[in-house]
């Protein structure tokens, strides 16, 4: 079983019902942790891994061999995770040192299983990075020079990574268990209902009548959807199925239609209030309250989508892009009704965070229950029990699968973080960055951006962000960058690979959907998404831009200045005018952002 859809939800699909049951168990487990109270890390985190194994190893299997081996690995993995959870009290007293052959075997197996689960989820790159880190931990004493280490006894290394609150069960996995999973469930339940149609209708009502209206509808709807999903590829596949044909029907160039969707969907990951998984990892790594991260992220995200908007206007002058036809624009009543499907949960979520003072995950849990209640209703607000059952089953399977995907990535990345901590390699890499940059901030920023781009080409955004910030973050902060700004800088550049060749997942999917050469789509996507390359640097040059919570006037002033500069650059890159005029626009825009 490789794909799941509502068509499989019938009496002849016992396997589908089994996945629904497993997804429901995963949802109940993660929600239960929020309401139950404190649960020891060596219980909740191994059980989290046990729940993700069937999805990654069996559900996603593509061949009979993968499925058969997936069953074996899942059964052994559940037993190994169960051993850790059942023996939590005694293992906590061992302080990460293995004292039996059984524990050594379980520890080595869990490490190998984490690598294999990540490989099946996202391919080889991240597991290879983790494997190299593990080999360095085991044999780094033989590395000459500065980058060697004194050596770590194997029982101590394996124990720290597998039976203590480090490595597999470290704080990063804790974020996956207690925060990321909750927002994944929230997104899955929203998407199973009519929230997606609500996003599309609202976007059409706001922007459909404007020049380039179909493209602007894509920008707004993809921004809203992407904030929930946190996945550019999934966002392109979902909203793009509606927006791309609409643009093609209005005679948009195919390359432009694909580029608009890829760029808008990529930006969804930086769009408050949810920002996908990365924002909550940032909460854990920086210790910054979620509300402050949202306040810091909102103006840069606004600038990103404003730049895309300006780019669409520039393309409109070249291609005579028309508004949506009136027959394709929803009525006010339809917009109002369908907007309730996302407005009610969103308002409840934000009210619980900003008014009641609840934690983001507790607030999201409450919003999840509201979203579940809305599954009883269709777009006409007609109550339907059978409709609820179908939507509920789809939501449970989607939640279970997405929790597993992100969990496999984060658990594998946790191995890298664990080895960096054990060996001190992170400090040495930081020293190397400082040395290469000659202790100057801007060269260090460019080196970090290059590392994010290279790593992000094959590693998902969250994992690329976590690994890059672990090794480069300390270097940037030691050069005077405040921690939150350093994390935002790395997080933004971890997104570059979604639209930047040679590996640009969002572009590939959009190009396939529109039937156009991917490189043509990529070139237009890079032009439209030029803010993704410039805004992180602009945040460093204009740090007040992320201080909306503390200095609103300064933040708004810097944002307005950067907006003017970005508008000039975007127009200069895209508009069909004399080359000298375009160069002037780009140079003037850069001076406004970085020199004024």
Image: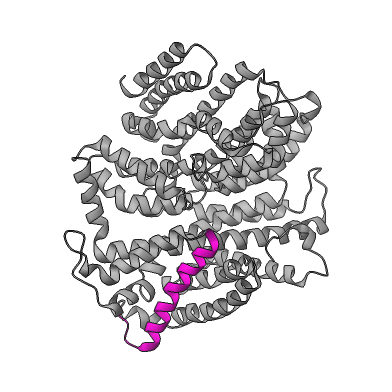
Q: Say if residue 282 shows up in the picture.
A: no
Asked whether 109 falls inside the magenta stretch, the response is yes
Taking the image as shown, residue 431 lies to the left or right of residue 311, namely left
Tell me how many marks there are: 0
Q: Is residue 341 above or below residue 15?
A: above
Q: Is residue 567 above or below residue 192?
A: above
Q: Quadrant of the C terminus?
A: top left
Residue lying at the far left of the rendered structure = 145
Query: Could you tell me which residue is drawn at 52 percent across and 46 percent down?
Result: 274
Spot occupied by residue 469 in the image (x, y as percentages of width and height): 35, 50
Query: Could you tell me which residue is drawn at 46 percent across and 82 percent down?
Result: 83
The overriding secondary structure of the stretch rendered in magenta is: helix
Query: Could you tell me which residue is drawn at 42 percent across and 34 percent down?
Result: 533
Query: Could you tell me which residue is drawn at 38 percent across and 74 percent down?
Result: 162
In the rendered image, which quarter is residue 423 located in? bottom left
In this rendered view, identify the residue nearer to me: 108 or 44: 108
The magenta stretch is 97-122
Spot occupied by residue 311 in the image (x, y as percentages of width and height): 54, 24
In this rendered view, identify the residue nearer to me: 293 or 213: 213
Spot occupied by residue 417 in the image (x, y as percentages of width and height): 35, 61
Asked whether 160 falls inside the magenta stretch, the response is no
In this rendered view, identify the residue nearer to me: 476 or 283: 476
């Amino acid at each position: 079983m490789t794909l799941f859809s509502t068509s499989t939800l019938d009496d002849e699909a016992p396997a589908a019902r089994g996945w629904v049951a497993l997804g429901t168990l995963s949802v109940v487990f993660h929600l239960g942790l929020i309401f139950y109270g404190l649960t020891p890390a060596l219980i909740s985190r191994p059980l989290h891994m046990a729940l993700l194994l069937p999805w990654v190893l069996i559900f996603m299997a593509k061949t009979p061999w993968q499925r058969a081996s997936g069953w074996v690995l899942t059964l052994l993995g559940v037993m190994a995770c169960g051993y850790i959870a059942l023996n939590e009290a005694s293992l906590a007293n061992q302080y990460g040192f293995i004292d039996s052959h059984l524990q050594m075997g379980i520890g080595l197996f869990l490490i190998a299983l984490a690598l294999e689960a990540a490989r099946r989820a996202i391919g080889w790159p991240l597991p290879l990075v983790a494997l190299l880190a593990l080999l360095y931990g085991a044999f780094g004493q033989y590395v000459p020079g500065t980058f060697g280490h004194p050596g770590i006894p194997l029982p101590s290394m394996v124990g720290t990574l597998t039976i203590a609150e480090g490595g597999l069960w470290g704080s990063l996995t804790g974020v996956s268990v207690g925060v990321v999973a909750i927002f994944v469930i929230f997104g899955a339940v929203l998407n199973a209902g009519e929230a997606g149609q609500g996003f599309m209708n609202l976007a059409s009502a706001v922007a459909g009548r404007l020049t380039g209206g179909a493209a602007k509808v894509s920008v707004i709807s993809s921004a809203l959807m992407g904030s929930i999903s946190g996945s550019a590829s999934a966002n392109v596949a979902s909203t793009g199925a509606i927006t791309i044909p609409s643009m093609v029907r209005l005679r948009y160039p195919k390359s432009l239609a694909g580029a608009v969707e890829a760029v808008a969907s990529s930006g969804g990951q930086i769009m408050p209030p949810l920002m996908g998984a990365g924002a909550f990892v940032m909460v854990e790594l920086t210790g910054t309250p979620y509300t402050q991260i949202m306040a810091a992220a909102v103006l840069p995200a606004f600038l990103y989508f404003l730049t895309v908007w300006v780019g669409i206007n520039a393309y409109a002058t070249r291609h005579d892009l028309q508004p949506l036809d009136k027959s394709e624009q929803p009525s006010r009543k339809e917009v109002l009704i369908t907007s309730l499907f996302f407005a009610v949960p969103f308002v409840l979520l934000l009210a619980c965070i900003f008014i009641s003072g609840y934690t983001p995950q507790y607030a999201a849990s409450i919003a999840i229950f509201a979203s579940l209640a809305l599954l009883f209703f269709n777009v006409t607000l007609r109550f339907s029990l059978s409709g609820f059952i179908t939507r509920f089953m789809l939501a449970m399977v989607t939640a279970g699968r997405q929790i597993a995907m992100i969990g496999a990535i984060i658990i594998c990345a946790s191995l890298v973080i664990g080895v960096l901590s054990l060996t001190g390699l992170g400090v040495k890499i930081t020293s190397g960055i400082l040395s290469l940059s000659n202790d100057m901030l801007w060269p260090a920023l460019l080196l970090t951006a290059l590392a994010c781009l290279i790593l992000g080409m094959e590693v998902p955004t969250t994992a690329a962000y976590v690994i890059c910030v672990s090794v480069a973050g300390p270097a940037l902060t030691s050069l005077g960058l405040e921690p939150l700004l350093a994390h935002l800088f790395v997080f933004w550049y971890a997104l570059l690979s979604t639209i930047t060749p040679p590996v640009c997942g969002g572009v590939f999917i959009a190009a396939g959907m529109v039937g156009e050469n991917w490189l043509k789509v990529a070139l237009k996507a890079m032009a439209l998404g030029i803010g993704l390359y410039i805004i992180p640097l602009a945040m460093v040059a204009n740090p007040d831009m992320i201080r909306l919570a503390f200095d609103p006037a300064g933040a708004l002033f810097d944002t307005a200045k950067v907006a003017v500069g970005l508008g000039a650059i975007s127009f200069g890159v895209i508009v069909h005018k004399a080359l000298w005029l375009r160069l002037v626009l780009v140079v003037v825009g850069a001076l406004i952002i970085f020199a004024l």
